[in-house]
Amino acid sequence: MEILLVDDHTLFRNGLKMLLDTLPGYVVTGEASNGKEFLELLAKHDYDIVFLDIEMPEINGIEAAKRAIELKPELKIITLSMYGDEEYYDQMVDAGAKGFLLKNTNLQEVKTAIDTVMNGGNYFSQELMQSLLRNYKSVKEAKEPEAELSEREIEILLLICSGLSNQEIGDQLFISKRTVEKHRANILCKSNCKNTAGLVMYAIKNQMIEM
C-alpha cells in the first residue's frame, strides 16, 4: 500500500514515515511540504492513501484536498491536525477527507484509521471526538438546528458514528441492510450532510454522542 505524507514540518514527516515503515504492507513512497507539491506529485503518481496537514504554505490542506479529490475521486485522505484546528473540520469533511487524527496519535490508531478508510469507512480518533464534544458543549450557539429524525433514525445515526457498516447495523437491529440504506439516505437528506463523515460531525455538533 503506497502512502503519501503531506506536512510542512520535516521532522514530523520523518517521524511518521519511520513509524509507518515498521508496519508490513505499508510503504511511504512520496512526501510533500505543502499543498502545491502534493498536487504536483499526485498528478504524476497514484497513491492509496494520503496523510494531509491542514495548515500549510502555498496551498492549505482544505483547498489541496478539494483539488486532489477532483483529480482522483477514489483517493483516501486522512487529515492530520493539532488541537485548535477543529474549526476546519467541517471544511475538510466537505472536501472529501475520510479520516481525522491528531498529530499525537499512537501507531496502533494510525493503522486502525488506515484500515478503516481503505475498507470504505470514515475514522475519527476518540481523543479528537472528545475534544470536539468539549468545544461544542462550551459554545451553545455552535449547536445546529436539529433535523426531525425519528427514533429509529437517531438509533441508526449513533450506530453509524460508532463505525458500523450498513450490514452490521442491520444485524444489530434485526432489520435488512436495504432498510438501513433507506434510513441512512433519509438521515443524510434531513441533516443536509453529504457523507458519513458529515453525519459524525452533525451528531457531535448536536451533542448526540456520549463519550
Image (tube, rainbow, N blue to C red):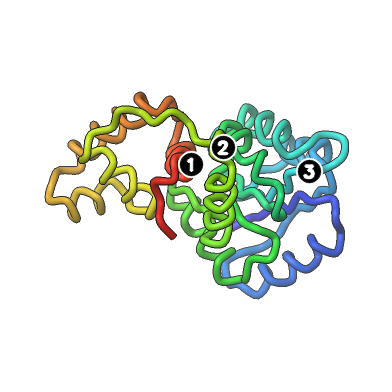
Figure quadrant of residue 188 = top left
Figure quadrant of residue 145 = top left
The image shows residue 174 at horizontal and vertical percentages of: 12, 51
Q: As displayed, is residue 171 above or below residue 35? A: below
The residue identified by callout 3 is: 55
Q: Quadrant of the N terminus?
A: bottom right
Q: As displayed, is residue 176 above or below residue 145? A: below
Q: Tell me which amino acid carries mark 1.
A: Ala
The numbered disc on residue 197 is 1
The residue identified by callout 2 is: 93
> What residue appears at the point 73 percent right and 65 percent down from the top-left corner?
16
Image-based side of 153 in relation to 176, left or right? right
Q: Determine crowd level at label 3: few under 14, some 14-19, many 20+ residues with C-alpha closer than 10 A.
A: some
Figure quadrant of residue 45 = top right
Along the line of sight, the residue nearer the viewer: 63 or 136 = 136
Q: Determine crowd level at label 1: few under 14, some 14-19, many 20+ residues with C-alpha closer than 10 A.
A: many
The image shows residue 190 at horizontal and vertical percentages of: 35, 25
Q: CA distance from mark 3 to mark 2?
A: 15 Å
> What residue appears at the point 26 percent right and 46 percent down from the top-left corner?
155
Q: Tell me which amino acid carries mark 3.
A: Glu
The image shows residue 198 at horizontal and vertical percentages of: 48, 37
Mark 3 lies on a secondary structure that is loop
Q: Determine crowd level at label 2: few under 14, some 14-19, many 20+ residues with C-alpha closer than 10 A.
A: many
Image-based side of 97 in relation to 177, left or right? right
Q: Quadrant of the C terminus?
A: bottom left
Q: Tell me which amino acid carries mark 2.
A: Val
Q: CA distance from mark 1 to mark 3?
A: 20 Å
